[in-house]
Image (spheres, rainbow, N blue to C red):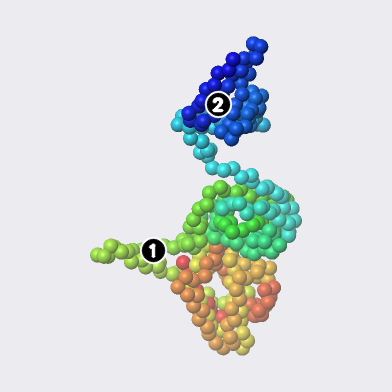
Amino acid sequence: MANDLTLPATGSVVRTIDNAGVHTQVFRSDAGQVLDAAAVLTAIASMIAGVRRDADTTPVSADGDVHPLVFDEAGRLKVAAQPGSQAATTGSITASAQNVSADVSRTSNITVYVTGTFAGHNCTFEGSIDSGTSWFAVQAIRTNANTIELVTGALSAAPAYAWELSVNGLTNFRVRATAHTSGTAVWRIQPAPYATEPIPGAQISGTQPVSGSLTTAGTTTNTPATPTPSNVNSAATTNATSVKTSAGTLYNIGASNTGAAAAFLKLYNKASAPTVGTDVPVLTLVIPASGNVDFDLGPMGHRFTTGIAFAITNLAADSDTTAIAASQVKVLTSYI
């Protein structure tokens, strides 16, 4: 005996066959294919299935468990509410020229931090767009200040801050040691999952005090803070001078030289007086013999991220320590 049931929704037929007391189910598709019960179960088991779970938690309990698709009470597929997780890269530097590198091809921003016990440690921040074949300098900003840096500066201990960078468009990023005296510096490069706007410090460099007044049109007129002058009359030395012991912006340099030979004004990004002949200046300016010069650094000035310092020597080489005469050179600087 057989009983046929036509399913209006699909046009398929389910048939029960009485064969010596054994009931067998068959399924006929609209295409005319007939499947027995075992084939039907196999087809059902092959479908992607999920579970309803009203709570925003995982339905499995341990690492390695098979995780089903999860649906809410309305049958919508759930996705994780938390951001994607990306593993950090860590590595140790124990000598100059070593580096810690990370693949950032799927990363927007990173935070880098150094720990350990070390001395004389200085690193540069570098990026690559060709999977590490070539490298170039990239800017980072300290987490505790609006200070942009291409290098860490000389570190004798782990600083109380980290650095943040945008790595959009880069394939790789690395921290490379340009100097290392002793110990082990452990660097951690932590990717961030979100794409964000450029680091605010890249838009306004350093501390920019302004005063303002609201006009009748509803706009604000800003006036830069008044620069601080510094006047130095040379001694019969190399004149190692600290102009500002913290980050600052240098706007103008005026200098005169009464000597019979040129003198050289050397500028340093340093929070203390430079060690002349050892520290490397960021800029060397020539003051001609029996002449004077005025260096205008423009409305934005030149930013010194650590401090403003200078020296005056008789020769141009970075390593020169030849003193000039007393009262031979006078230097006037304007900075904020």
Q: Which corner quadrant holds the N terminus?
A: top right
Q: Position of residue 322 (x, y in %)?
A: 67, 77
The type of residue carrying mark 1 is: Val
Decide which of 218, 76 is in the foreground and name it.
76
How many C-alpha atoms fall within 10 Å of the one at disc 2: few (<14), some, or many (≥20)? some
Which image quadrant for residue 155?
A: bottom right
- Give the left or right position of residue 219, taking residue 78 as reference: left
Instruction: Give me the residue at 63% from left, 18% from top.
Output: 24
Whether residue 259 is visible:
no
Which element is circle 2 on? strand
The type of residue carrying mark 2 is: Val
Q: Which mark is residue 13?
A: 2
Which element is circle 1 on? strand
Whether residue 50 is visible:
yes
Instruction: Give me the residue at 65% from left, 14% from top.
Output: 19
Q: Is residue 132 positioned above or below 262 on the image?
A: above
Q: Position of residue 46 (x, y in %)?
A: 63, 31
- Give the left or right position of residue 223, taking residue 278 as reference: left
> Of the residues tagged 1 and 2, which is closer to the observer?
2
Q: Position of residue 249 (x, y in %)?
A: 50, 67
Decide which of 315, 46 is in the foreground and name it.
46
- Look at mark 1 in the image and give the residue it sits on: 210
Say how many tags the image has: 2
Which image quadrant for residue 258?
A: bottom right
Outermost residue toward the front in this view:
1
Q: Which mark is residue 230?
A: none
